[in-house]
Amino acid sequence: MGLLIPEDISLDKLPASERRVIRTFQSTLKDTWLIIPRVDLIDDRRPYEIDVLLINDLQGIAAIEVKGGPLQVRDGEWYRRGQIVEPSPPRQAQDAAYELRDQLQRHSPLLDRIHVQSAVALPDLRDLEDLAERLPPGVAAAQLFFAGDLADAKGRMEARLWELMDTNLHNRPLAADQVEAIVGFLRPDLDFRWDPQAQARQARVTLHRITADQTRALATLDLNRRVVVSGPAGSGKTRLATAWAERAMDRGERTFLTCFNEPMAEVLTEAAPEHDLLTVGSVQKTLMALEGVPRLDVPEGAGNEWWNTVPFTNVLDNIGDVVVRFDTIVVDEAQDFAPRWFEVLERLLYDEGPGRILMVTDPHQGVYDRGFLVPTAGPDLVRAELIVNCRNTHQIADLLQRLGGAPAAPGAPEGAPVIFVTCQPGHVVAKVGEMLEELVVESQIDPANILVVTGHTALRDRIREESPGGFACAPWEDRHGGDIVCETIHRMKGLERDAVILATNDDDLGDHLLYVGMSRAVSRLVVVGPSVLMARLQTGRGQNQEGGSKLGGLPEPQRGQC
C-alpha cells in the first residue's frame, strides 16, 4: 500500500473526488510511494494548490490536480456543464508543479535540479472518449488518469505512473536525503526519515498483521481430533501451531508443542507462554527427557541413524512407564517427521482425554526425505490449506513462486529488489563480506537481524572462521551476542530474519533447498553463487548491478563476475 504522509491525516474534509483518488493510490501503489494530500503553496503573487502529491525514490515527484464532475474538451477548451474552465485543469496542475519545483530548488542545494511532473485525475470520466475526440496541444494522454485507470482492474497503476514520468526527461530517481528534504519542506512538523531499518520494521509489522488475519480463521479446527494444515513458506504455520497450543491450554489440556530441529524449538519456546500444562521442545530431546523413560547416553559421533531411531524405540519399549501423557500434541514442520515418529506420538496421548494430534506442514520444504506423506482427508482427519505468503515482501515472494511458493498476501509491502551476485566458487566468502558491508553499513540493518545461510557445512564453517568483511558470524546458539547468524539451510528451517544472504559454491544446489533458504528473508534477500546457479534463478527480468543483478521487471540482467 502507498504510504500516506502523515499516516494519521484525516481526509474527511476533502472533496469526495479527492478522497477517492487518494484512497485509490493508497490501495494500488506499493509502499515505496509516499502520498501527500492537499499541498498549499503561496508566492508573492498568488496561492497554488496541489490536490495529491506522489513521491517515489525511483521515479520522482508527481503533482496531481483532481477534477471531479462532467468535463469535456471542445476546440481546445475545457468545459464543465457548458462553462469554460479557466485556467484549464492541465494548466492548473502545471502551474502548481512549477511553483513547487521552484520553491524546492530554493529550499535546499540537494534539490537544485529537482523536477515536478504534473498530471490530472478525472475520477468521474470513464476514459479518454468521455472527455474529447482530440486533446489540446501540449496535453499528453499519459498525463490524464480516468476512472478506468483508477479502478486498476488489471493492476497497471505502477505502469501508468511510469508512462506519466516518461513524458519528461527531467524526471529522475531521488536519493534518500532528497526524499527527506522534500518531505521536510512540505511537512516541517513531521520527524520523517527515509530509513531502511524503519521500512524493514514496518514490513514486519504489516506482514505479522496479515499472518494473524489468515491464521485466525483456522484456529478453531483444533476442535477436531486429527488436523493437518499445509501451507507454503511464510504462510503462518508456526503462528497457527502456537495458537493451537494456547487454545488447548485454555481448555485445561496438557499439551506438547514440538518440531524436529533445535533452533525451531527455541523459537517455539519463545513464542509460546510458559505454563505448567505446556511442554515445548524438539521431538527427540523431549522424548529422551520423559519421566519414567530410561536415560539414554548419546554415543560420541552419533549420526542420523541413531537420532532417527533410538529415542523413539526407547519410548516404545518403555511406554508403560511413561508418567505424563498428553491431551493434545501439536507438530510444527511435520514434513520433517518419519511415519514411525507419529506412531510414538499417538502412544503418548492420554487414553481418557481428547486425544488430538494437530500438525502443520509444507511438503515443498521436505529436505530430510524421511517418508512423510500428507494424509488424506476423511471422517477422522480434517485437511486445510494456507494459501498466501505472509512472511516475505512482494519482491522475495515473486521469486519464491518460481520454486513452488505462494503469492504474496494482498497488502504485503513491496520491499527491496532481490540481489543476485554471480561469483566464482573461490570468491564466495569475500563476496559475502561485501554484501554484509552493504547491509550493515550502507543500509543500516542491525547485524542481529541478518542471517547467512549455506547449502553445506564446509562453506558455513569457512564463513564463521574468516569473518568476511570483518563481520563476526556466529552459530544460532550464540545469536544473543548480537552477531550475524551463519548456519546451514537445514538448521534454519522455519526461522526468519529481516535480511538473508544465501551463499553457495554449488552449481546444482537443489530447488527445495533454495526455496527453504531464500524464504527465510522477510524484506531483504541476497543470493551469492556460481554462474550456473544464477542462470537458473534469473529467469525473470532484472536491473544491472555491478557484480550481480536485481530481479524487478526492468532491462535484462548482465551477469557480473567477481
Image (cartoon, rainbow, N blue to C red):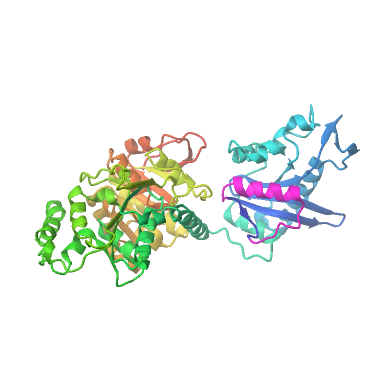
Task: Tell me the magenta residue range.
Answer: 8-32
Residue in the picture at 38% in, 38% down: 537
* Left or right: residue 168 compared with residue 465: right
Q: Is residue 484 above or below residue 138?
A: below
* Left or right: residue 239 compared with residue 284: right
The answer to whether residue 446 shows anywhere in this view is yes
Q: Quadrant of residue 375?
A: top left
Q: Nearer the viewer, residue 157 or 449?
A: 157
Expressed as whole percent of the image width and height from the top left, the position of residue 9 reads 68, 60
The answer to whether residue 113 shows anywhere in this view is no
Check residue 21 for magenta coloring.
Answer: yes
Check residue 447 for magenta coloring.
Answer: no
Q: Is residue 130 above or below residue 437?
A: above
Q: How many marks?
A: 0
Q: Nearer the viewer, residue 542 or 215?
A: 215
Return the residue found at the far bottom. Answer: 276
Q: Nearer the viewer, residue 190 or 14?
A: 14
Expressed as whole percent of the image width and height from the top left, the position of residue 420 reads 40, 43
* Left or right: residue 67 compared with residue 248: right
Residue in the picture at 70% in, 50% down: 53
Expressed as whole percent of the image width and height from the top left, the position of residue 277 reads 30, 70
Expressed as whole percent of the image width and height from the top left, the position of residue 461 reads 24, 55
Q: Nearer the viewer, residue 366 or 467?
A: 366
Q: Quadrant of residue 140?
A: top right
Which quadrant is the C terminus positioned in? Answer: top left
Q: Quadrant of residue 193?
A: bottom right
Return the residue found at the far right. Answer: 83
